[in-house]
Amino acid sequence: MRGGASSVPENLMVSIVIPMRNESEHIRGCLDSLLRQTYEANSYEVIVVDGRSSDGSSQIVRSMQSNHPNLLLIDNPSGITPVGMNLGILKATNKIIVIAGAHAIYSSEFLRNCVEKLRETGADVVGGPITTIPADYSLSARLAAAVLSSPFGVGNSHFRTSLKEGYVDTVPFGAFRVDVLRKVGLFNEKLLRNQDNDLSARIRSAGGKIYFSPTISAHYISARSVGELLRQTYKKAQWHLFTLRQNISALSLRHLTPALFLIFLMCLTAAAINGFWARIALLSVLLTYFIVGFSYSLRERAQIGPDVTLFLPLACLLFHFSYGIGTLVGFRYLVGAAPTKPIRSGLPIQ
């Protein structure tokens, strides 16, 4: 731990690790929220692991270091997210490690509540809900955020749609006891996506406990448009089958449901070419989908507004199609090598 003496016991000091590559739009807001915690400043460090950013992100971090001696910046030559996480963990000096995301803004009580829940529950990992907020006030940006906030869009993704406290399978931006990471290992560096699900599954398999509390809150800034969300979803979903190949417990049926739904619709569509009852079935399925979608939209209309309410079912359908297509395209990673390039755009890694 850097800085002056702390009154917080050594076993309750925290290291926050933030993997970063080309996050100039978000990194300052993220760091401002983490450097203004109610937790004693001398009791935690913030380690930003830069994946060779080419948009000025690292310069933003450096400009903040003079006023924050507990802010560190280290290099990730690979630009790969799980490699950056592991480099940050190995650099960390404290007994509690938080893996944070640069696209998020954290409540001022975030660290204090993480530590308190670790003490109260004895869990190995704690985390809480994320509230998805639009990148701007355009209809497309608000639709993208609404898709990720709606149970109709993301299903039973507990940390996005629920405030029920208790033990869960995984949490975002988790606070880990360093002992559990020593026990089960660090992030799988082959998984450019889903590395958090894989680590959570290994922790559970080793008898570890993951606890969810609504007191540990953060805001996640979503894609700027529905189109950007669909591209991100398509790319992420391609990793699902490869992730299952690495660890069969890492994902649940929820992650495969869009692909199964897409296959079902494709089969119905093929049968409908020459089959009257298949056409009726296809129309019935789509009609039911939109009726259910609108029922969810209407429940949320006070929060999302009338324009988003109207278009949300269609945006969810495109989201599910993108998710399903990505999953099916991901079959190629079962026979071929998975990508090893950074998932964030930027200059090529040398």
Image (cartoon, rainbow, N blue to C red):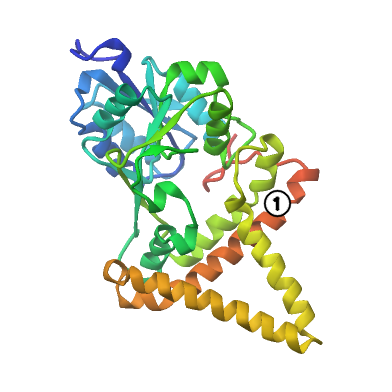
Question: Given the image, on which type of amino acid does mark 1 rest?
Answer: Gly
For the residue pair 173 and 203, the one nearer the viewer reads as 203
| Residue closest to the far bottom | 276
Q: Where is residue 301 shown, x and y percent of the image?
A: 31, 72
Q: Quadrant of residue 187?
A: top right
Instruction: Give the residue at mark 1.
Output: 330
Residue 25 visible in rendering: no
Count neighbours of disc 1 (C-alpha within 10 A) and say few if under 14, some if 14 to 19, many if 20 or more: many
Q: Where is residue 193 shown, x and y percent of the image?
A: 57, 42
- SS of the residue under disc 1: loop
Q: Is residue 284 left or right of residue 181?
A: right
Q: Where is residue 72 shown, x and y percent of the image?
A: 34, 24
User: How many numbered dots are placed on residues in this image?
Assistant: 1
State the residue at coordinates (73%, 76%): 268
Task: Pick the quarter of the image with the C terminus.
Answer: top right
Q: Quadrant of residue 264?
A: bottom right
Q: Where is residue 171 shown, x and y percent of the image?
A: 43, 39
